[in-house]
Image (spheres, rainbow, N blue to C red):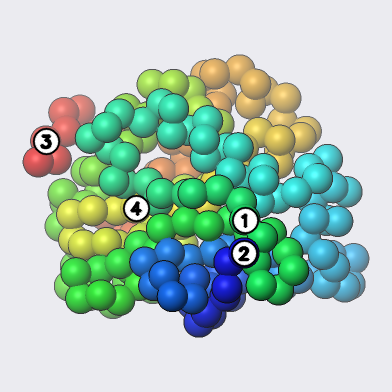
Amino acid sequence: MIELGELISSVGGWSNIYVVKDAPNKCVKVLAPHRKYQGEKPDPNLVAKKKYGIDNMLEFEYANYQKIMKCVPDNLKKNFVHIDGMQMTSIGVRGLVMERVMTAEGTTAPSLDHYKGEPLPDAFFCKLEQIRREVFHKHSLDHFGVALRNVLVRDNRTPVLIDFQKNRRIYRSQINLYIPYFTRQKVRRNFQRLYEEAHVQDWTTVKDLHCD
């Protein structure tokens, strides 16, 4: 059983994230009723079942993660948070156990929307674009969760992707997302929005990448 330690994030719509007690390099995501649905804040799994036909959002996320990681080359695996899997926690619910992404200073890595350091160099965003091209575009993967809040800054050259809860099943009415071309286009738009919100160039238009 996983003992929960310090709460390190409660800003997500579906979950809280805690440090694993006695294992500060690990954290665990557990579902929490943050998001309003029909005027209330119910169990997220009830919402997921009604809206998307998904029984358990964390198991769904872990399955998405495993599908993506099968397509990630070794040189890019450090740019995806390492997820161990589902385990029972001390509060009586199962949680998703994963790496706690840390900075060189030993603090929890901030997401791009909370990053307060020096302006990030081109190498950081070049790496993100490399991930888009070599993982998501190449394999037509239906991962639509790329956003400022879901990219951590391990250091100024190393983005780390987290949160894998959005794929085509979340967009049930968009049947076109089962066609690879439209999947790639939607993922491209996600990355373009991230670049725009980060106030950097649209890296999807850069012909040749030289990230290293």
Q: Nearer the viewer, residue 47 or 5?
A: 5
| Mark 1 residue type | Gln
Q: CA distance from mark 1 to mark 4?
A: 23 Å
Q: Residue at x 23, y 35 (%)?
A: 75
Query: At label 4, which amino acid type do we have?
Result: Val
Residue labelled with disc 2: 1
Do the residues under discs 1 and 4 have CB atoms within 8 angstroms?
A: no
In this view, the mark in front (3 or 4): 4
Mark 3, mark 1: which one is toward the viewer?
1
Q: Position of residue 130 (x, y in %)?
A: 27, 35
Mark 3–mark 4 Cα distance, whole angstroms, equals 19 Å
Answer with mark 3 or mark 4, whichever residue precedes in sequence. Answer: 4
> Left of 205 or right of it: where is 47?
right
Residue 169 vertical placement versus 36 (above, below)? above
Check disc 1: other Cα within 10 Å, few if <14, some if 14-19, many if 20+.
Answer: few
Question: In what element is the residue under mark 2?
Answer: loop
The tag earlier along the polypeptide, 1 or 4, is: 1
- The answer to whether residue 48 is seen in the rendering is yes
Judge whether 130 appears above or below 15 on screen: above
Disc 1 target residue: 87
